[in-house]
Amino acid sequence: VASMRRPPSTPPSPAHRGERVALVAAATSWHHREEDEEEDSSECGLGVSGWLGLLVMNACAGTAVALASSVCWQLAFCVSAAYTGLLVGLAVCLEGYKGRFQPFVNLLWVFVAWFVFILGLFATYDIVLPVLGDIADAQLPAPAPAPAPAPA
């Protein structure tokens, strides 16, 4: 065991310490520059599973909106609005990671636009058209009574 011990070494002089720090700093900065170049050149830091997860999540959200629509349109509107808010929040939070998640953030904004379109459809068909229909019915003259059937 005594042969495995390292012989005592003399501490490096201040000049040697300065050289060592400079070498470590140069090596570290070179290493970080290489990572930055790789990060910029990569398309997105998510990988295939991240993209598939996003697509599956949106398919599930669309299904949830469709099922909620079969119950009542108000529930579907609320589910769609909540999911749109979640997508907007996620996109805004990921905006800070400019280079790494930019393609993912772009796709999130596309999905936000799609769900805003769905919210607009709910608003148009279930809020605006019934109100316009009531206004149109009030402005039309009452239909003439049907003639009485002839006696046989």
Image (cartoon, rainbow, N blue to C red):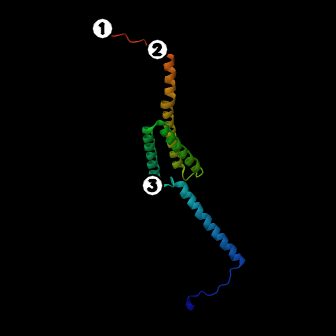
Q: Earlier in the sequence, mark 1 or mark 2?
A: 2
Q: Is residue 85 above or below residue 122?
A: below
Indicate the quadrant containing the N terminus: top left, top right, bottom left or bottom right: bottom right
Dot 1 amino acid type: Pro
Dot 3 amino acid type: Ser
Callout 3–callout 2 Cβ contact below 8 Å:
no
Q: Earlier in the sequence, mark 3 or mark 1?
A: 3
Q: SS at mark 3?
A: helix
Residue 56 or residue 105, whichever sits in front: 56
Residue that badge 1 annotates: 151
Callout 1–callout 2 Cβ contact below 8 Å:
no
Dot 2 amino acid type: Ala
Q: Earlier in the sequence, mark 3 or mark 2?
A: 3
Residue that badge 2 annotates: 142
Structural crowding at the residue carrying mark 1, measured as other residues with C-alpha within 10 Å and reported as few (<14), some (14–19) or many (≥20) = few
Structural crowding at the residue carrying mark 2, measured as other residues with C-alpha within 10 Å and reported as few (<14), some (14–19) or many (≥20) = few
Q: Is residue 77 above or below residue 21?
A: above
> In the displayed structure, does residue 150 sit left or right of residue 52?
left
Residue 89 or residue 139, whichever sits in front: 139
Mark drawn on residue 66: none
Residue that badge 3 annotates: 49
Q: SS at mark 2?
A: loop
Indicate the quadrant containing the C terminus: top left, top right, bottom left or bottom right: top left
Q: SS at mark 1?
A: loop
Q: Residue at x 67, y 71 (%)?
A: 21
> Could you give the CA–CA distance between mark 3 and mark 1, rounded to whole angstroms?
77 Å
Q: Disc 3 vs disc 2: which is toward the camera?
A: 2
Q: Position of residue 149 (x, y in %)?
A: 33, 10
Residue 16 at least partly seen: yes
Q: Residue at x 67, y 84 (%)?
A: 10
